[in-house]
Amino acid sequence: QVQLVESGGGLVQAGGSLRLSCAASGSIFRITNMNWYRQTPGKQRELVATITSIGSTNYADSVKGRFTISRDNARKAVYLQMNSLKSEDTAVYYCNADVQRIATTTTMNYWGKGTLVTVSS
């Protein structure tokens, strides 16, 4: 089995910073894309940032220039540095990854349980 566990969420004032972490564990052979999503009540889950296995990144327009996604392949971890936070960044942030498990040839998509980020104005 594969688990993704997020950490680093919390309450921060507008203009502040937070760093989210996500660690993958289990019978993992390879992780390709790693992503951060976020969701607020009544809205669809939104893709915030993506990083490929070779480090190529992509961001939602709403976070470009403020958020930075990075990964540590040796630790099977992905991070989201969030700066200049705004009240509209308040959401549950989810880690997501495409994982090939050991002794398999297929890639499956996994989700963490989420971590709450609250930005007070």
Image (spheres, helix red, strand yellow):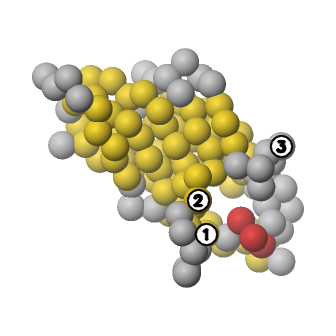
Q: Quadrant of residue 9?
A: bottom right
Q: Label 2, on which residue?
A: 46
Front-most of residues 12 and 79 = 79
Query: Which-is-in-front pick, marks 3 and 2?
Result: 2
Front-most of residues 50 and 17 = 50
Q: Is residue 102 visible?
A: no
Q: In x, y percent, where is residue 16?
A: 81, 60
Label number found at residue 65: 3
Q: In x, y percent, where is residue 102?
A: 18, 25
Q: Label 1, on which residue?
A: 91
Q: In which quarter of the image is residue 117?
A: bottom right
Contact flag, marks 2 and 1 (Cβ < 8 Å): yes
N-terminal of the pair, mark 3 or mark 2, is 2
Could you tell me which quadrant the C terminus lies in?
bottom right
N-terminal of the pair, mark 1 or mark 3, is 3
61 displayed left or right of 36 = right
87 displayed left or right of 48 = right
Q: Can residue 4 be seen in this view?
A: yes
68 displayed left or right of 36 = right
- Amino acid type, mark 2: Glu
Q: Give me the residue at 77% from left, 76% from top.
A: 120
